[in-house]
Amino acid sequence: MSALQLVAAYALILVVAGLSRWRQVGIERDIFYSSLRAAVQLVAMGYVIQWVFDLRAFHYLLGLLSVMLLISGRISAQRGKGVTHAYWIATAAIAVATVGTLGLLLALGVAEPTGRFVIPLGGMILGNAMNITSQTLNRFLAELRARRTEVETLFSLGASRQQAARELLRETVRAAMIAPLDTMKAVGLIHIPGVTAGMILAGTPPIDAVRYQIVIMYMMSSAVTLSSLTATMLCYLQAFTPDHRLR
Amino acid sequence: MAGGVFDVTLDLFPGEIVAVIGPSGGGKSSLIRLLAGLTRADSGTLTLDGRPIAELDARDYRRRVAMLFQQPHMMAGTVADNLRLPARLRGEEDNGLDVAGLLRSVDLEPELMEREAATLSLGQQQRVALARLLAMAPACLLLDEPTAALDPVSTQTIVRLLQRLCDDGVAILLVTHEIAVARRLADRVVVLVAGRVVEAGDVDQVLVAPQSEAAQAFLTAEGAAP
């Protein structure tokens, strides 16, 4: 792809920013700055990944994944403002998902412990786990606010904290998981997922690309479920005290 | 102590009704939530039958000291499901609860037991909420503005029910901003201003001839003091 073609693609961004201005939606500044920021971040990422590939040592990969984890925890925690220790909860939830799924793929030999596998897969897991953790924190807070009377009524009727929180926790995970579950249902029917699209564009036979996609889809589903469950459980332990009260 | 309540000494005995009155923001809600075990005191001691409640299991305590909220919350299911809830939360599936008897005790028709609880009127819901607490046979009832959301007829019914419960030996603590309700129901009145008890005593003495300036100011503002 030539540099000119790359710049031409940016025309699309200018068109939607123009539309936003014309219809007075007011997001053109956001579109403009976000698109520039994304380009800078992607180019930087390309150089960093190239550098990491050249290092060829696993502990460097771990270091890079840890930095990515801390950043994703920070971003996710912003959605959970109001949850005490939101940063630690988000980071722990994303870490559990990443270690669990990536660790399994490495242990089973599906992925090699090299930068070419660990960084893209780790990045995908972190990104998805981060999104679902943000959703979970946000939803937990909303449910806690909406169900305060219900929870306290249950307490006043002698409920334990597990009993008082049951519906709230169920609803938190259910609502947070709607989008990823729908994505899994629609995969291949409505949209061609990123990995398949990328591999086909890069010249891989579609069947081979699909095989990778299946592994990755299962990995993502496990990762988002793990992170949502972990975040919900940690929020619960934070908000409901062992002596059956709301903190 | 906690949440803007300081230095409150209060005794409550079986078969009596104590009303806590005072201006909004004076600490009434904080006090009743503290007594219900929904919040915790930073310092000080709450005792039940002479034992500090910190030593008691929170769940057992709440079954003995039950709280009725201003807004009744009906759980999903029928009225009967709601009345059986305390037993279910204790892990007893069917303990032969007399649902019809409980409904009659709060002046509701036993036929209502199969109705979806959420479809009842607010006044009926508040009575179901009261019956649900009575299913636990509590020794003490805490009531947070129990009639504030109700129409005059439902208020009358609740007041009558509380008097009956009190005659049965239940200790009742009532938080209210309605001095008329306190006057009709209470044996003793506590006036809470800025988190402190400024006056406490028999209902006639406190409402008719308050001694402290703060209590006089509050009752005059409410049009209750001479």
Image (cartoon, coloured by chain):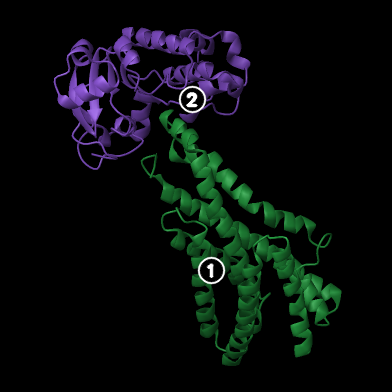
Chain colours: A green, B purple
Q: Chain of mark 2?
A: B
What's the mark number on residue A72?
Answer: 1
The residue at the far left in this view is B211
Judging depth in this view, the residue of A47 and A88 nearest the camera is: A47
Distance Cα–Cα, label 2 vs label 1: 42 Å
Question: Which quadrant would residue A39 be assigned to in this image?
Answer: bottom right
Task: Name the residue: 41% across, 54% down.
Answer: A84
The residue at the far bottom in this view is A54
> Image check: A63 left or right of B68?
right
Q: Amino acid at mark 1?
A: Ser
The residue that disc 2 covers is B72
Q: Quadrant of the C terminus of chain B?
A: top left
> Whole-percent x and y of residue B51?
22, 29
- SS type, badge 2: loop
Q: Amino acid at mark 2?
A: Pro
Q: Quadrant of the N terminus of chain B?
A: top left
> Image check: A50 left or right of A69?
right
> Whole-percent x and y of residue B70?
43, 25
